[in-house]
Amino acid sequence: MHTLRHGIVYTLYFVAVVCGQLTKSPENVAGLVGSDVTLRCAGTLLSWEEYVSDPTGGAVTISSQASVFKPNMYDVITEPTGTYDLTIKSIQLTQGGRYRCKAFIETTSYTSAQVITFSALDPTCTSNTTNNEAVEGQYIEYSCERKYQGNLTPKMKWRDLSSGEDVTAKDESSAGTVKFSIVVEMTPSHNGDSFTCQTYFDKPQSRDNYADNIPINNNAFNVLYTSQRLNVYYGPRLLAVKFNGRGHTSGENIVVGESNPATRNYTWKNTTSNEIIETGESITVTVEMLGSQSLKAVVCNTIPIPSPHTVCSDFPVNATTTTTTTTTTTATTAEITRATTTKGAVAPSGRTTTTLAVGGKTDGRKHCVSFQSTNISGGGDSTVTIVGTVLGILLCVALVAVVMLVIRVRRLSAARDDALRTQPLATIPDGQQPAVATSAPSQPATRDGTYQGLYQTIPEVRQNDGAYEMIPPAEGTQGDRSEMPYANTRQYENTRRA
């Protein structure tokens, strides 16, 4: 039994050695024409085959164990660890295709790898631009193509370097040639931009050992082409408006924009009448202009291609309201600022003026027109402000004086009435008839505010020991009536006191 067990072990070992086995499988690889390409494999009793040179697509043996049949084209590296790597020397375009590493006796112990070869020449990339110049709205086409050979089909990817986003490309590939193109409509944001083209492979679904990043690990296949920076020409356009008509300082940017090439022509107009107020890089704005009237700056530049032509845009500047502008067409760039007034300065002809200047700056990509308040020609704003403040103070003082006077008169009137109510009746001298006081009106006032039919019963006056006394009329009698109308109760009260 012991002998039988050892015999089985030896037999299995012999079969393994004779049949051979794989311990490492090769992976897909790509190479440029003229470079060396290596496929890695490991195991025992191995050999390499290629399916490239036979016109019928059959297998052609490259090596068997340590024997290499075409040493001028191939090299096999063997090591005691079982390494059995195949190197294709100075690979040619026609050598792209399938290669297989297998055990000495072919069973299921074999594996294949794809070799993709690319032309060593730079990819052929074209563009319909001249000197990398374009005009806003123009459609620019980029295209790249390259020769290759192999059983895996490469693809190309285009990317906008400015935005970092991929651009949708059109596949125009054919057998042995990969070609992708893009068409881009030029906008001001493309000024100074570049586009790149790179190669990649889709991962096949049939074999797990088909690497999906064959060329990505090699910069020679990653980025094939990078275009030159574009010079996109466009007319003046508006970027932002932040003018609220007050509180701005000299040099503050109010309207911001840009153009390419730099702006060279400026015209200032009345927005309502379209009347030209001034031409040139600056204008003196009066107080009247900054009232209900609004201004606009017409900014123009010259586009040199395809033939020189002028492009103009309007920049409205409303001095009384906050302006918000959204540009959907070719608009301009500008900055308008109302500066603070210099105190003590005198404006010519008695008018307040503010100087607005236009200045251009170029940074190589974008031109920024700056409508800025650089100086104040007069101090009328300060004078108007002071006069207005003084008039306001005087008006307040006058109102306070009137109120105080009214309060004073009312207080004097009240004091006089109190004095009359507390004054005692005068003593009646001998031989004189006392004055008769009347009572309050016995009937209400009419609608016109006067009292009608006011009368008072007259009491009887008798002399008693040299003095006079009033005896009221007997109960139930009317006594003598004296109709005494009064205009109001105050007149009645004063008469009674007299």
Image (cartoon, rainbow, N blue to C red):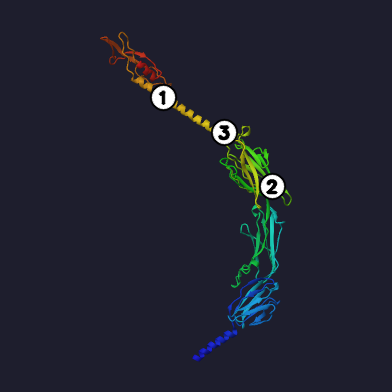
- 1 or 2: tag closer to the N-terminus: 2
SS for dot 1? helix
Task: State the residue position of label 3.
Answer: 383
Check disc 1: other Cα within 10 Å, few if <14, some if 14-19, many if 20+.
few
Q: Earlier in the sequence, mark 3 or mark 1?
A: 3
**Mark 3 residue type:** Thr
Judge left or right: residue 351 versus residue 122.
left
Q: Is residue 219 above or below residue 313?
A: below
Looking at the image, which is closer to me, 452 or 73?
Answer: 73
Q: CA distance from mark 3 to mark 1?
A: 41 Å
Q: Residue at x 63, y 33 (%)?
A: 348
Marker disc for residue 410: 1
Q: Nearer the viewer, residue 147 or 196?
A: 196
Q: Quadrant of the C terminus?
A: top left
Residue type (three-letter) at the residue carrying disc 1: Arg
The span from disc 1 to disc 2 (Cα, nearest Å) is 76 Å
**Percent x, y for residue 477?**
30, 14
The tally of labels here is 3
> How much space separates mark 3 and mark 2, taking CA atoms?
41 Å
Amino acid found under the numbered disc labelled 2:
Asn
Q: Quadrant of residue 25?
A: bottom right
When asked about the image quadrant of residue 409, the answer is top left
For marks 3 and 2, give the one nearer the viewer.
Answer: 3
Q: Is residue 494 above or below residue 114?
A: above
The reply to whether callout 3 and callout 1 are in contact (CB within 8 Å) is no
- Does residue 144 appear in this view? yes
The reply, left or right, for residue 23 in relation to residue 186 is left
Q: Which residue is mark 2?
A: 301
Mark toward the viewer: 3 or 1: 3
Q: Position of residue 398 (x, y in %)?
A: 48, 28
Position in image of residue 102 (x %, y %)? 62, 80
